[in-house]
Image (cartoon, helix red, strand yellow):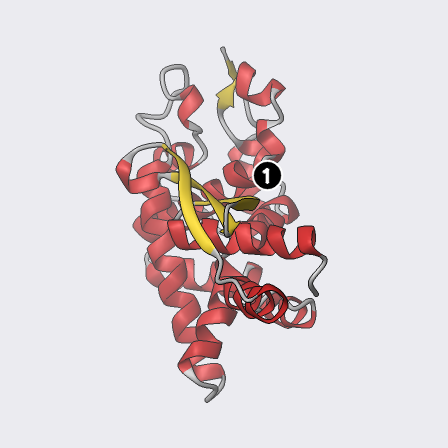
């Protein structure tokens, strides 16, 4: 059975956006576990795919006009803003998990508070906003709820390229260049979740997950830095 979410009105009030087509909002909030049991026509992965692209464009445009810092630095800033951890945090701020359609099994397994579910649903919400209300409304949402976290992310060092930093540390401390390997990939082609492992020689140091190989490698490097105690 599907565990029913809270009313759409509560979510719309929280984000300050009224959807004309409630069906597309319903789809954005539907986890794949509930697709056969909810009133939506499908799950949210196609909208997530669209929302991811909208968010990346909005973020890139924002950073381009914000500062004249070099491309490499802006890329790291953008990565910090759109990474799963930050998107899940934003989703919690608007109580998005409470509004998701999902199976009772998914819910009992902690699905309403799982970072991947929350981040994916937030991207799907942005995609639905783009389809239903257009680019400007989705842009305003991103600026209000996501891009405002830039200052704190920079202060916390979230913009650091963990993969490059881990490589520098490994070469300096051990004279070894890390190697990465995809150890798992689940989901449809347009929305896969990857698990990557990072190795120092024959030693597997850590694993990381992400919705792209690059993000999974960054997550693995971040975990490896903790394992090795390299700051």
User: In the figure, is residue 6 to the left or right of 71?
Assistant: right
User: In the figure, is residue 40 to the left or right of 228?
Assistant: left
Q: In the image, residue 220 lies at what x, y percent?
A: 54, 50
Task: Answer with the quarter of the image where residue 231 lies.
Answer: bottom right
Task: Answer with the quarter of the image where residue 136 lies.
Answer: bottom left
> Given the current orientation, which residue lies at the most extreme bottom position?
68
> Given the current orientation, which residue lies at the most extreme left position?
189
Q: Is residue 39 visible?
A: yes
Compared to 59, does 2 lie above or below? above
Q: Which residue is drawn at 48% across and 78% down?
A: 73
Q: In the image, residue 45 lies at what x, y percent?
A: 35, 37
Along the line of sight, which residue is nearer the eye, 222 or 13? 222
Task: Answer with the quarter of the image where residue 108 lies.
Answer: top right
Along the line of sight, which residue is nearer the eye, 191 or 160? 160
Q: Is residue 16 visible?
A: no
Q: In the image, residue 71 lies at what x, y percent?
A: 40, 80
Q: Residue at x 40, y 42 (%)?
A: 182
Q: Residues within 10 Å of mark 1 (few under 14, many from 20)?
A: few
Numbered circles on residues, count: 1
Residue of label 1? 10
Compared to 47, does 217 lie above or below? below
Mark 1 lies on a secondary structure that is helix
Q: Which residue is drawn at 37% across and 44% down?
A: 48
């Amino acid at each position: 059975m599907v565990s029913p979410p809270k009313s759409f009105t509560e979510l719309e009030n929280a984000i300050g956006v009224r959807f004309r087509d409630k069906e597309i909002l319903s789809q954005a909030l539907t986890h794949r576990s509930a697709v056969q049991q909810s009133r939506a026509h499908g799950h949210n992965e196609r909208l997530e795919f669209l929302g991811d692209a909208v968010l990346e464009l909005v973020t890139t445009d924002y950073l381009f006009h914000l500062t004249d810092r070099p491309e490499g630095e802006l890329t790291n800033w953008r990565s910090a803003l759109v990474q799963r951890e930050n998107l899940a945090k934003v989703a919690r701020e608007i109580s998005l998990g409470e509004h998701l359609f999902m199976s009772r099994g998914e819910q009992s397994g902690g699905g309403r508070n799982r970072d991947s579910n929350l981040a994916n649903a937030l991207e799907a919400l942005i995609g639905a906003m783009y389809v239903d209300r257009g680019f400007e409304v989705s842009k305003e949402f991103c600026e209000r709820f996501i891009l405002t976290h830039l200052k704190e992310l920079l202060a916390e060092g979230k913009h650091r390229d963990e993969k490059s930093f881990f490589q520098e540390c490994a070469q300096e401390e051990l004279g070894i260049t890390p190697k990465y390997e995809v150890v798992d990939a689940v989901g449809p082609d347009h929305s896969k979740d990857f698990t990557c492992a990072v190795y120092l020689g024959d030693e597997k140091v850590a694993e990381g997950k992400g919705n792209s190989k690059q993000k999974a490698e960054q997550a693995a490097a971040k975990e490896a830095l903790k394992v090795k105690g390299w700051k």
